[in-house]
Amino acid sequence: MSLFKTNEWWRTQCGVNESFDKHSLLITPLFGADRKDIIVIGSHSGYLRIYSPFSQWIEETKSPSGYKSSDLIVETQISDCIIDMKAGKFVSGSSDTRLAILTPKKLVIYSIILSQGSVEHGNHCDLEIAYEHLLPRFPASLTTGPFGGVRGRDFLCIQCLDGTLLFYEQETPTFSLVLRNRLLPEPIVYISRNDIFVTPSSSWILECYRYKSMAEFGSKDRSEESKNLEPDWTYNIGEAVLDIDAVILSSFEVGILILGEKSLYCLKDNCVTLKYSKRLEYKALCFQPFVIEPDGKLMVLVIADTNTLMIYEGTTLRWSAQLPFTPVAVTRAHFQHLDGVIVILSEEGQLEACYLGSEPSLFIAPPLHRRGYDYVAAEDELIELRKLAKKNKASGNQLSDVTMDAELIISVTVSADLEPCPRGNQDDSKDDSEDRNLMCRITIELSTYMTLRDVQVCVDVSKPFVADKDRHVITNLCDRHVLRAMIYPTMDLPAISSDVRITASYETADHGSLRVLQKTTQLPLKMMLRACPPENTSTFTATIKCSESLVAFSQLFPEFTGEVQRKNWNVLGLQHLQTGSVVTIVSGATSNRYRVQSNDGLSMALVVQQLMNRLKDKATGNFTTAIAQNHIQLIQSQMEAHYHSRQKVDKIASEIKLLSTQLRNIERRMLRAVRERNTRSLGTTGLPFLLESTYRAIFALLDDLAIARVERERAGHGLRCVMRLLLLLLRLNVNDDKYAMLEAAIGFDPQLCDELDWEEIADVSLSAFLRSTSRKSTSHLDTKPTTLTKMTSTKEFSKLKKHLVHAIERLDSCREADIVENEQLEAAGDHASS
């Protein structure tokens, strides 16, 4: 991390949910050098934005004026994706600067017409298509320049994914050329002083081609070609090239700057003489060379993966500064009121023009005191502080930053009126779909008394519910802002929780510190359950015993009390809207017990959670429960289902990997046959048939993989349900410390990762939990660190199940025989009373 930070001169956000790369940023004087530079941004979503920054220094506030709405002069969608952009003299008979936009299907040349002061807020700009070229191949990058030494005109060169170069002399296509040793598109630069193209090959060798040789070779008859065009000069770089650029050092010298994965190189324009090289001790993301006039000093801007801007003069690091985000493109610009501005663009569309400052902002460590320390007194003080922190945590009097709570106030309103969801399953009947697919509106109001930057609000709900827009981004929040979202179900899975977590993160404008706030609210229970007749028989049962008198269902679940509740005052039936499973709650007639029962153990987690939360609010006294044997069997069956679904996904992925290797070998053989111009027909070799059959096998396995991943997701949700039910029941019997340890060990969501998932993490966590709760002395325990490795054998999985059973038995304080006997007596009394 650098000691200094860059200072913001001008900043904005380019769109929402769009992506950008190093070709998405272009700085050019579109309207003439007297109007300074213009920023052109093209996103992968096809949006073209042109900015004319007019920020200036304000003496009263000692800060720049920043972004204004009039700075955006063009915003339009022109294509599905903008791959590259260049500016130049692309129209014959005209010396005006035009804009070339490279899209997946065509190359479009735009004329930009500026009408000054035509509207109230500023200038008005229009785009007109001058001409366009349809592309025969998928493009990767665009290079422009006065090819062949022409004057007053710029030609275009498009590099395709297969290594083909397409050349256009403005409106006229001229020739195409295939370079040798090309596996992927590589950076390419044109040097007009020598009329050469410089580009690296896939062998990490820098190659130089004269345009005259390329034109002569490309215009030959294809039947006369015997081999690829040989380069004029080569230089072995020895590492992958991230980017390449050229700068004019003097009237007789041009420097070629190459950014490699590990080094920065500067070569002369003959591509055989190395001026200097600099070994980089970090991973570089992008760079931009420039020359300071009139001294002629060569400077290079390099962006490190630590969000640090490095400025080199030759091999000497002259300055470094911390950036506010991770850029994918960097360049310099000259604006109306400031020259030499550094412009950076992030992958998410954060665009900033900044300048270098000299005010340090990091914490300076105090000097060390070499006097002796009283370690005994320090240990006593540490013990007292831990006791105080534990006491505050137990009493709920946790320390909070009052200033942070006042900076941003979050108010969440959940609509009690549910609406039919148009996103319901089409296979369901109309009546059933209206009952099952309900959506709820939530309103999030943000209030602040100061300016907050980069406010991000995330809405998180548990499956099967999702939010139509789970992430909101506000660039600058000054007063009040209202966000709205819809919560609706997407899958026929049992609901596990009604919590809606709102997480907001932001940066303060004054200090730039990052703050995070979180607020939790509840969805209406009618969105997940509805009242139904209770069921008498059940497979899974959970009994909750209360030391005080019971609370009536009309107070616990008032939204479900109706005709069914009036007939059975001590029995309540609740049905899941998504799965149709029925959960019955029975209150004891002769004892202070609640019995929750169902034929579907996965559906009990939500009802047990709601019952326990409402009992804590309405009832007094202590609650206890026990873990029955069928609960453990249910947990083990869900663990096996999740583990087998993982193995199935891994098996299909391995088969796809083998077929992909076979496919690459077939394609390599076919390409070799085509290049060698074999006299035999390609069809007689059997390679096309083998290629087609391999493709069909891969596509079939891809369909199977999609189905297997859905099954794995459903198995993961089932595993989450049974673990949630287990933790809810154990919560009543164990102390806070042991419960927190067990919840951290098994209470997390399955990760849906290929290598490490719930089984591997839970196995290590349960082993540590059993060691920490063992009655043996710690000297006899194995304290070696455990490494996370993928679980592949059935023996390891069986050991995981045993560890979980041991943990449950160690924490469960009630005896199962007693609880089963009491359940039978209570059930007999309940049936007699009903």
Image (cartoon, helix red, strand yellow):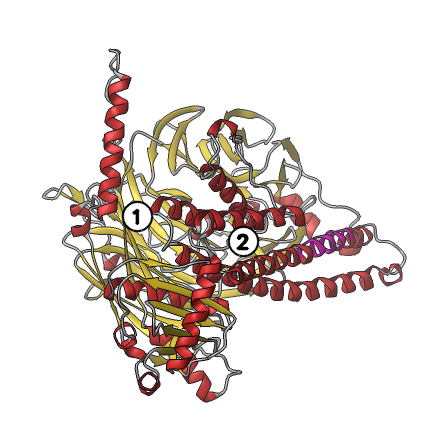
Is most of the magenta stretch helix, strand or loop? helix
Tell me: 489 left or right of 337: right
Q: Give the secondary structure at mark 2.
A: strand
Q: Where does residue 405 sit, x and y in percent of width and height?
A: 19, 51
Q: Residue at x 51, y 26 (%)?
A: 279
- The quarter of the picture where residue 158 lies is bottom right
Observer-nearest of 174 and 731: 731
Tell me: 496 left or right of 512: right
Residue 608 sits inside the magenta stretch: no
Q: Give the secondary structure at mark 1.
A: loop
Q: Is disc 1 in contact with disc 2, using a CB cutoff of under 8 Å?
A: no
Q: Earlier in the sequence, mark 1 or mark 2?
A: 1
Write the start and end of the magenta stretch as one range: 653-665
Q: Callout 2: 10 Å neighbours few (<14), some, many (20+)?
A: many
Q: Residue at x 46, y 70 (%)?
A: 824
Q: Kindly identify which residue carries mark 1.
A: 36
